[in-house]
Image: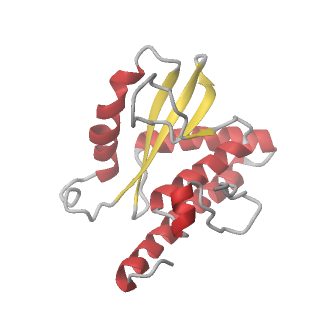
């Protein structure tokens, strides 16, 4: 099955599947849309992003920490960005002050940090909450990407940055709404 293209920033905000499974279901999860928007932002900068790059950690089965991977980032190394979406309303998150920070530390960094030592890639966990928050590390990476994109495209930083945050936020909230509606009536949106 041919993969549809990732949404361009110049098009209206539509959801295009980035994985064959999502294309078959004709719906996308919060994770898929957030990852796609991150990839779209990186693609504008001509940084040659790779989606779900295999083999970053060598021959390991089932471990793909690079949802969006940039071959050249800093210090002669690439950057593997692991995008995740968590809900602060989930039972495991209700008593946490910063659910996305905790999720990044316990689920992403605990799982991958040791594996990245001595590799050609740096690792970043970009964790969004369904209510809109993003972890500090993810926010810093996005700010750097937005700064680079605005310079590359010759646009004013504040204008570009505001629109980029709005695109990510709207995509996340729209997919959350679709997920809620899907659960209420049992039909895919």
* Residue 48 drawn above or below residue 36: above
* Quadrant of the rendering where the N terminus is positioned: bottom right
Examine the image and state in which quarter residue 44 appears.
Answer: top right
Residue at image point 70% right, 35% down: 48
Give the mark count.
Answer: 0
Q: Nearer the viewer, residue 177 or 187?
A: 187
* Residue 47 drawn above or below residue 114: below
Residue 108 appears at what percent x and percent y? 35, 38
- Residue lying furthest front in this view? 1
Specify whether 33 is left or right of 71: left
Is residue 27 something one can see in this rendering? Answer: no
Q: How is the image coloured?
A: secondary structure
Q: Nearer the viewer, residue 61 or 42?
A: 61
Q: Nearer the viewer, residue 51 or 123?
A: 51
* Residue 154 drawn above or below residue 58: below
Specify whether 55 is left or right of 94: right
Q: Nearer the viewer, residue 111 or 140?
A: 111
Residue 98 appears at what percent x and percent y? 29, 51
Residue at image point 58% right, 17% down: 75
- Residue lying furthest right in this view? 154
Residue at image point 44% right, 13% down: 118
Is residue 101 something one can see in this rendering? Answer: yes
Residue 24 appears at what percent x and percent y? 55, 65
Specify whether 42 is left or right of 182: right
- Residue lying furthest bottom in this view? 185
């Amino acid at each position: 099955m041919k993969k549809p293209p990732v949404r361009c920033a110049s098009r209206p905000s539509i959801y295009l599947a980035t994985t064959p499974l999502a294309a078959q279901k004709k719906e996308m999860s919060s994770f898929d849309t957030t990852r796609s928007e991150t990839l779209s932002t990186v693609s504008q900068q001509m940084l040659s992003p790779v989606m779900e790059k295999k083999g970053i950690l060598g021959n390991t089965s089932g471990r793909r920490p690079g949802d969006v991977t940039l071959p050249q980032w800093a210090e002669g190394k690439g950057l593997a960005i692991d995008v995740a979406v968590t809900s602060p309303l989930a039972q495991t998150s209700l008593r946490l002050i910063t659910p996305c920070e905790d999720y990044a530390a316990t689920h992403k960094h605990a799982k991958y940090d040791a594996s990245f030592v001595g590799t050609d890639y740096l690792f970043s966990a970009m964790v969004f909450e369904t209510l809109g928050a993003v972890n500090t590390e993810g926010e810093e990476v996005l700010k750097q990407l937005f700064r680079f994109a605005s310079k590359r495209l010759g646009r004013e930083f504040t204008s570009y940055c505001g629109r980029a945050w709005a695109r990510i936020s709207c995509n996340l909230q729209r997919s959350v709404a679709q997920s809620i509606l899907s659960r209420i009536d049992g039909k895919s949106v």
